[in-house]
Amino acid sequence: MCLAIPAHILEIIQDTKECQSLEQSKVNRAKVMIMGYESIVDIHLLDAPNTGDYVLVLDGCAIKKIDEEYYNHLTKVYKQVMEEEV
């Protein structure tokens, strides 16, 4: 089973890279905060992502925008799970 992790977008990173076909392609990535750690994730699946948005991240890719209330709820749940003894 895979779990998506809640993240907060800190910065949108837009650069241009050459594709194999030698055409220019815009690559959209973002710097995000995930449970206190900064990471770079792909954001090409999101519709109009912005700095400050809350998202779900799966396998290094932001897959869905979420609201702040749900972000806070998921963060709390993940922290509780991580604190549980195995």
Image: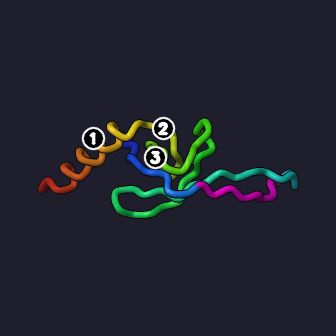
The residue that mark 1 highlights is 73
Say left or right for 81 vs 67. left
Dot 2 falls on a residue whose secondary structure is strand
Say which amino acid is labelled 2.
Lys
Please name which of the two marks, 3 or 2, marks the residue nearer to the observer.
2
Q: CA distance from mark 3 to mark 2?
A: 9 Å
Q: Position of residue 45 (x, y in %)?
A: 60, 39
The foreground one among 13 and 40 is 13
Of labels 1 and 3, earlier in sequence is 3
Q: Which residues are magenta?
A: 12-20
Of labels 2 and 1, earlier in sequence is 2
Q: Is residue 25 magenta?
A: no
Number of numbered callouts drawn: 3
CB atoms at circles 1 and 3 under 8 Å apart?
no
Say which amino acid is labelled 1.
His
Mark 2 burial class by Cα count in 10 Å: few <14, some 14-19, many 20+: many
The residue that mark 2 highlights is 65
Q: Position of residue 39 (x, y in %)?
A: 48, 61
In the image, what residue occupies the spot 54% across and 50% down? Answer: 51
Q: Position of residue 67 (x, y in %)?
A: 40, 36
In the image, what residue occupies the spot 58% across and 51% down? Answer: 42
Dot 3 falls on a residue whose secondary structure is strand
Q: Is residue 13 magenta?
A: yes
The residue that mark 3 highlights is 57
Mark 3 burial class by Cα count in 10 Å: few <14, some 14-19, many 20+: many
Say left or right for 30 vs 39. right
